[in-house]
Image: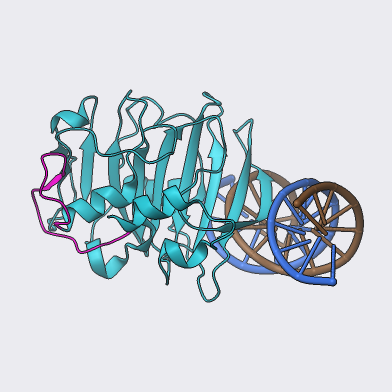
Chain colours: A cyan, B blue, C brown
Amino acid sequence: MHICMDQGSHLGMAYRLPNLHAVPDHYYTTSVPLSPLQLPCLPKLLQMSFDQEEEALLISSDQCALYPLPTLLAFSHGHSSSATAPAVLGEKPTAGYMPNIGAEEVSTSVTTRVGYEGAGCNGGYSGTWWRGSMAGEKGKMKVRRKMREPRFCFQTRSDVDVLDDGYKWRKYGQKVVKNSLHPRSYFRCTHSNCRVKKRVERLSTDCRMVITTYEGRHTHTPCDDTSPSSGDHHTTTCFSSF
DNA sequence: CGTCTTTGACCAGCGC
DNA sequence: GCGCTGGTCAAAGACG
């Protein structure tokens, strides 16, 4: 699946990037802004990757409102009939919450051609998935064997590093990465038997842009992570409504 | 006291 | 094989 929503993606523009393999594609398009959560900025969905295959979904916009990724998938699943729902023009995926999307749900067999042309998409981010994505393009770099969990990467403009996505995370590492002025933080879902991880880092070229990469699938709902005393009820409500 | 963050060390993948 | 780099571990400290 290769989807690129350029400037004005909220206007319903969606087009397919060149694909080297003849495989079914999924198309998403948003006609108007979705209901934002409390996250501070519209995320730019940079890439989805599954197993050793890569999927690209690029969404860029200058709008400064947040569209939760789960919304895209929930709407695509037919959870909304309003005009705000993104239409699925291709095959119909069956994913629910964003971090839960899995290979068997939306994956197709493709080779990556990621269009790092939009603002921020080429902002110096050089994570592992990026290297993996380059494998398909240059045919030299090998896909890392460790990349087996479904990944979901998006970009937001925010002053805070950790965006509240409804799940509870524990930080287990921080690393200064090459070609980045800002350290990358590593988080793990605190829910037992849930091995979802996420990485958070800021663009070196724009310190306000936060790149969040989810890896794996949650085995629970966000509600399971939110204790009555410490949880963000607004967040829980928003995510549960999808 | 339990939980979480910090941070240096260690390990594995990858390119040369 | 070696060095670089990213990802993870785990001990120590901070905090409520």
Residue drawn at the location 57% of the way across and 38% of the way down: A161
On the image, the x and y values in percent for residue A57 come to: 28, 44
Extreme bottom residue here? A193
Q: Is residue A167 above or below residue A11?
A: below
Tell me, yes or no, if residue A140 can be seen here. no
Quick check: is A70 in the magenta stretch? no
Q: Tell me the quarter of the picture where residue A66 sits.
A: top left
Tell me, yes or no, if residue A165 can be seen here. yes
Quick check: is A85 in the magenta stretch? yes
The secondary structure that dominates the magenta segment is loop
Residue drawn at the location 44% of the way across and 33% of the way down: A40
Q: Tell me the quarter of the picture where residue A170 sits.
A: bottom right
Q: Is residue A180 above or below residue A166?
A: above
Q: Is residue A6 above or below residue A30?
A: above
Q: Tell me the quarter of the picture where residue A61 sits.
A: top left
On the image, the x and y values in percent for residue A32 come to: 17, 32
Is A160 left, or right, of C11 in this rendering?
left
Q: How many marks?
A: 0
On the image, the x and y values in percent for residue A95 come to: 25, 62
Residue drawn at the location 47% of the way across and 60% of the way down: A144
Task: Tell me the magenta residue range.
Answer: A78-97
Is B11 left, or right, of C10 in this rendering?
left
